Structures are given as C-alpha cells and as structure tokens.
Amino acid sequence: MKFSRGVVKSRIAILILALILMVPSVIGMVKTRVNYDMLTYLPSDMETVKGQNELLKDFNKGAFTFLIFENMPDKDVAALKEKVEKIEHVDTVLWYDSVADLSMPKEFLPEDIYKAFNSKNSTMMAVFFDTGTSDDRTMSAVKEIRKVCGEQCFISGMTALVVDLKDLCEKEEPIYVGLAVALSCVAMLLFLDSWLVPFVFLASIGAMILMNMGSNYFLGEISYITKALSAVLQLAVTMDYSIFLWHSYNEELATNDDHKEAMALAIRKTLTSVVGSSVTTIAGFVALCFMTFTLGRDLGIVMAKGVVLGVIGSVTLLPSLILIFDKPLQKTRHRSLIPDSKSFSKKLIKIFPVFLIIFAVLITPAYYGYRKANKEVYYNIAETLPEDMNYIISTTKLNEEYGVGATHMILVRSDLEADSVRSMTEQIKNVNGVKYVLSLESLIGSRIPEDLIPDRLTSALKSENWELMLIGSEYGVATDEINSQIDVINGIVKKYDSNGLVIGEGPCTKDMIETTDRDFKIVTAVSVIAIFLIILFVEKSISLPLILISVIELGIFINLGLPHYLGQSMAFITPICISTIQLGATVDYAILMTTRYKTERIAGHDKKESVWTALYTSIPSIIVSGMGLFAATFGVALYSDIEMISSMCMLMARGAVISMLLVIFALPAMFMLFDGVICKTTVGMTHINSVKKSKEALIHG
C-alpha cells in the first residue's frame, strides 16, 4: 500500500514528470534511425553477409544498381554517366564506354554482353556505391541520380526499393496511429461505462508509447516493421491494464467514499493482476528474440519494453489522470452497452458438448491449413508493393526488356588462373536461367584486345585479393528456380575456389528463407514452453496450462490456416510474429476466466456453477480486450499499401476475435469435461469432490 498511496499523493508530480519526459521522448523518436532493408538482419556469420563485407572492404563497393535509359542517344547517355560518377558515394559506373571508346562499334562487345546491356530502345549501365544498400548516404545518392537523370532513366536495385519503401512508410505511419487511436476510441466508447474515460486512457497510453519510441534511440536503429507496428500493438495489448484499473477503482468507490483511498486500493489490486497478466505477453515478445534473423529481436525488444512501460503507466500516470479528472469522469458515466451475460452463459453451459465436438472437428482442417500456409509464404517484399511505385516500374522494365530478374555477384581469388576463370565462366553461362556473365575474362580474348581494356574497368573488377564477376539471372528473387540456380552456381564456384563467394539479393534472400524456416520452429517452441511455465507457476497446475494453450493454439491454427483456404499467401515473417503475439496477448483472456473458475471451485461451488460464474463474469472483460486489439489493428489492415504490414495487422485483428470466441465458447466446455482432472492436478483443488451434488437451482433458475 505504501507504493499505491505514494502514487496518489504524488499525482501532480507524476503528471508534470510525464510531461517533461515527453520532450526527450519526441527527440529520441525523431532521431532513431529506421532500417528498411530486411537482408541486413541476416546472421553475420553467413557466407553471403561475409561476401558483402569483403566487397565493401576490398573493392569499396557496397550497394549495386542498374540504370536503364530509354530512347536516348549514346552521347547523352555518356554525358549523364559523367554526372552520375560525380555524385557523392557513387564508386563506379560501368557502361559501354567503360570498355571501349564510343567511336568503336558496340558490335565489338561479346554478343551476350552486348544483348545484356542493350535493347531495341534502351541501354543499361551498372552503378556501384561505396556505401551499403540501406545506408542513408546510398539512399541520398539514389535520390540524386533520379534527380539528375530525369524521367527517361529507371533505377532498379535494393537501394531503390529501400528509398521507395521509406517514402511510402513515412507517408502512411501517421495514418496508422490515427486509425488505431480513432477505432480504439470507438471500441472503448461502445464497451466502457464512461464517455470521457477513453480519452484519459489514450492520453496515458500515448505517453507510454512516446516513451517507448523515444527510448529506441539507445538501440541504434529499429526496422520499419517495428516502427509501423509497435505503437499500434502497444496501444492494443496494454489497453487492458487501463480498463482493469478503471473497473477496480469504481468497485472500490462502491464501498469507499474517499476517492484517494479507493484509488490506492485499486492501484494495489491492479498492480498484482496486471503484472501477472503482462508476463505472458512479455514472454511472447521475448520469444521473438530467439530468432537468428534479428528482425525478431528488434521487434521483440521494442514490444516487451512497451508492455513494461504500459504496466508502469497503468499504475502511475493513469491513476493520476483519473484523480485529476475524477469529477467529469464520474459525471459522464453511463451504463455499459455490453448486455448482461448470465442468461447467455447458462445456455452455453447446458450445450457444452456441442462446443467440444466443434473444437475436435476444427483441429484437423485448422492444423492442415496452418502447415500448408506456412509453406506458401512469400519472401520477395517487392512483389506486393503498389504497381505505380518507381522501383516496381524500373524492375518490370529490367525484366521485360532485358530478361533479368536478379543479379548475382561472385568473388573469387584474384590469383586464380585465367584459364580456370574462363572455364568457370563457361560452366556458369550454361546454367539454366543465366543470361550473361560479366568478368575481365569474358572481355579479354574476345574481339576487344587486352591492351584496349581501360585500367578503370580492370580496377573495378579486380582487386589485390578478389576478382568480381556479375551474373544476370532471368529468374526472380525468392523463387524455387533461382534458389536451385544459386546452388548450382555455388557448386561450380567452390570447385574452382573453395573460398569463392556468391552474393547479392538472390543468395541473401535464399539464406533468409533457410534461416527464418528454422527460426519459426524455435520461436514457436520457446513461446509455448515459456507461457506453459508461466501458467504452471501462476495457476499451480499441470493440466490447466495444457488446456489453456491448446485453446489458444487452435485459434492460431485457424487464423494462420485461413490464408491457405482463401488462396492467400503471407509474408515470411508473419507466421513467426503472429503465432507468438496471438499466444502471448490473448492467453490472458483464458487466464482471466481460469482464475475465476478456480476461485469458485475452491470456495466450495460445484463444477457447473463455478464454470457459469467464471464465464458470465469474464465475458465483458474478454469482449473489451478482444475488440480493443481488433479495433487497433483492423483499420491499419484495411488502409496500408504495404502488404506485409496490412496482412500482419489483419491477422492480429482476426486472431483477437478468434481467440475471444474460443475462450468464450470452448474453454468453459473444456472445464466441464476435464474438471475432475483439473481438481486432481491443481494445488489447492485436490480436496474438491468433483461429483459433489450441484446447486441446480441457481443454474436452471
């Protein structure tokens, strides 16, 4: 009580402190760098990542892109090439005049090289930057190239994607938050008992969201997925804590005229309940930190931190705001729009076997769809972006006019014999889907004499330690065809140079596919085991964790299985995140009902009466919680043009409703079926006679 009374006494100071903290929070949020490149989250010990680092260290080359010039004379292209070369952080530009003088006919180029870089109406040049793909300096350079080259130039490559994705995210993110706030407010106005309290909740939760986003500055950077989802998720999953305090406060007011004392008692009750409730949510987010694909750690840390801040806000800032605005809050109270659920709950208990049958029938198709949908995920984020995006237009042109879906880079030892390199090059050219191989050896010995190869081209493709080769593939990134192609090319390269490296967007994406597939299994296991142990500790039971997790896991199977039956595919990160978020955030619904059921049974009530009481007393809180999570995420799902964010929010919204329905309909039926087992395997319930005559009158009215 000392803490609770201290909060009540210091309410003005707490409010002032919160307002002061808003200033560094906003500054920290603005200054936190956002990473839009998913490939940077690959483990650092992977060959593709090591290869990218070697390319940057040895060649001073990081990002790579193609520029396509349409309907432009060669002399104008050459003039633009000179301008591009002068842009800061552009390291090398390779075009025809890098190989020979413009006066020399292009037909002197090897036929495959000529066709690779020229089409009927356009010509293409390769640009290397001395900074990384998602480096802010590279993005600035790409923007400058677009400005210099004008509308007749189209820029492909990962950095162009990152630039366009950043622009789209920055345009949409304020609307995400606005939609989440507006729809959450509507849900609270509908389901709570005051017209004013939703705005007080939003002020308190909003302050905690700002503090969370501001403190991300100390992480160095966060991903765009984390930035887009964290505010929405924090609002959704911590709203319950505010609702619990408000209900506790009003319950205390019914027996206590002193508002300050009532709030102190409410804070104490809330702290005990909310800490226990938040642990499962935090565990779900912490499980994401076990991913080797470190985007999970990024989202997990930020969201776990957000939940902790949400708990702190619900027992410090929110009580202070409620006491300060107590009079208008009490004056604007009204009856809750959620109808009394006693009669409804009686009917559910009477027909509980029906829900057991439905539960059993759903398991097989839900699990089948879940397994199938997890194999039908997509990894190429670009495929789902708006078609009018600059990057999408450029990539489409690259594919249609040049037949190039992706570009690989190969690094082999610089002292590797020329004959070996030529032999390796010829073998790679014969691999299915390879359009061209550009290397010094593919030029030397062709119709271009060796002494005519400019030094700047030699230095661009060969360093003291490595020789660089470019491979054009007609296959798109993240397809089965390109992954098989990369395996074959890698095998050829290793045959000639055991230390050779195959790098680029395609190989990195292939590594991402393999990494996240392992991660999904690990994160799912960690989240289930962690939450099992938490429920085991909280409920002091062996059987209850199994029952509760089975109910929520069925909800996850249904939610993640529906895309398979609906003919939809999910982003690769979606099943990993949704499985842990839905389990961690919605198992609280089940814990709430379970705790009340246990309390009733231990108090001496029979099985049916205990389940009935637990059900009708829990339904309002479960509906408010479930609809709160639904409201915060559904609007974003409908609005966002970034399919990954849209689908994740849709799955969170749908998952909240599915879990809510399963807890209301299936969990009471499980209690009715397994009551005897629960009593025998739960501390404090072993003395209960599960076949004791029930008080039928109360149930049957």
Image (cartoon, helix red, strand yellow):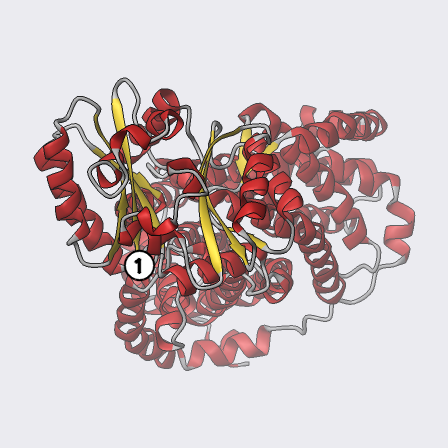
Q: Is residue 4 visible?
A: yes
What x and y, as percent, mark residue 342?
59, 73
Q: Residue furthest left?
A: 495
Q: Quadrant of the C terminus?
A: bottom right
The residue at which mark 1 appears reads as 474
- Taking the image as shown, residue 619 lies to the left or right of residue 665, namely right
Up-down relation of residue 575 to residue 350 (above or below):
above
Q: Residue at x 70, y 43 (%)?
A: 205
Instruction: Between residue 244 and residue 16, name the one nearer to us.
Output: 16
> How packed is label 1: few (under 14 Cα within 10 Å), some, or many (20 or more)?
many
Residue 271 visible here:
no
Percent coordinates x, y for residue 42 in the rendering: 35, 37
Identify the residue shown where x is 57% and y is 37%.
84
**Image location of residue 201, percent across then percent down:** 74, 48
Could you say which quadrant of the image residue 4 lies in?
top right
Question: Quadrant location of the N terminus?
Answer: top right
| Total numbered circles | 1
Q: With respect to residue 461, does 531 lie above or below?
A: below
Instruction: From the viewer's perspective, tell me whether residue 492 is left or right of residue 546.
Output: left
Horizontally, residue 146 falls left or right of residue 361, namely right
* Element under disc 1: loop
Frontmost residue, 378 versus 452: 452
Q: Say which of 357 and 16 sits in front.
A: 16
In the rendered structure, the answer to whether residue 459 lies left or right of residue 85 reads left
> Residue at the location (72% across, 43% down)?
206
Tell me the kind of residue under disc 1: Glu
- Residue furthest front in the image: 103
209 or 394: nearer the eye?
Answer: 394
Q: Name the residue at 27% across, 49% down.
A: 110
Residue 323 at x, y percent in the picture:
84, 40
